[in-house]
Amino acid sequence: MILAEDTRVTKKLLSRYEISTPTMSYHANSKLSKLDRIVAFLEEGNDAALVSDAGTPAISDPGVELVAAVRKLLPDVRIVTVPGASALTAVISIAGLHAAQFTFLGFLPHKKGRETLFTEIAANERASIFYESPHRILKTLESLTKHAPDRTIMIGRELTKIYESTLFGTPAELLAHFDEHKDEVRGEFVVLIAGK
């Protein structure tokens, strides 16, 4: 069985390669009963693959709950990774910024503790990397303008996808870019803030 965030998205890829393996949705809103069904399926000796619509399963992704449950409930089940596209490693590899040591923050909180986190990012000696949505990228850059105005930032948009683009600059320069190119405030973003 193939477990997918959105089976419709995954079926497009599967049909292209004439793969007819059954699919089941597994995403952030899946109920515990679905997790129980998956565990029972594996307990019977079956194999399952976990795929993500974008990026790598279990990296800032609901798949982490499934992997944790399988490790706990079925310790003898072998979990194998097939590395694929990951915005985290992709941004480091093309940034040309020193990021041998970095702090990965996943998706930032929407409200509580968000400004405190920007203060911590500004004080961090290491590079900071996080994912951001198109709905919050401008507010993020505004906060970074306030907390880390002189830091070099690289933004990767839609990395490893057809409309991939990258931007470099200070938070204010990036805000100005998006102000002039409003059509680019869409897709999935990964933000790398150079260390001090």
Image (cartoon, rainbow, N blue to C red):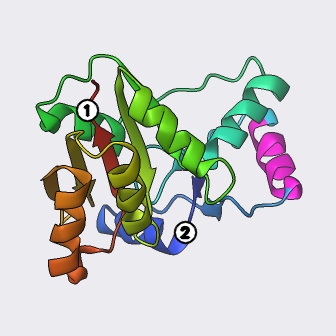
Per the rendering, the mark at residue 194 is: 1
Residue 39 lies in magenta, yes or no?
yes
Image quadrant occupied by the C terminus: top left
x and y, in percent, of residue 121 in the image: 44, 35
- From mark 2 to mark 1, how far is it between C-alphas? 37 Å
User: Looking at the image, which is closer to me, 73 or 176?
Assistant: 176
Q: Is residue 74 above or below residue 119?
A: above
User: Looking at the image, which is closer to me, 17 or 135?
Assistant: 135
Residue 122 lies in magenta, yes or no?
no
User: Looking at the image, which is closer to me, 104 or 83?
Assistant: 104
Q: Is residue 125 above or below residue 168?
A: above
The residue sitting at 65% across, 47% down in the picture is 113
Taking the image as shown, residue 119 lies to the left or right of residue 42, namely: left
Residue range in magenta is 32-42
Per the rendering, the mark at residue 7 is: 2
The residue sitting at 46% across, 67% down in the picture is 136
At label 1, counting other C-alpha atoms closer than 10 Å, the crowd grade (few under 14, some 14-19, many 20 or more) is many
Amino acid under label 2?
Thr
Q: Is residue 72 above or below residue 26?
A: above
The residue sitting at 25% across, 32% down in the picture is 194
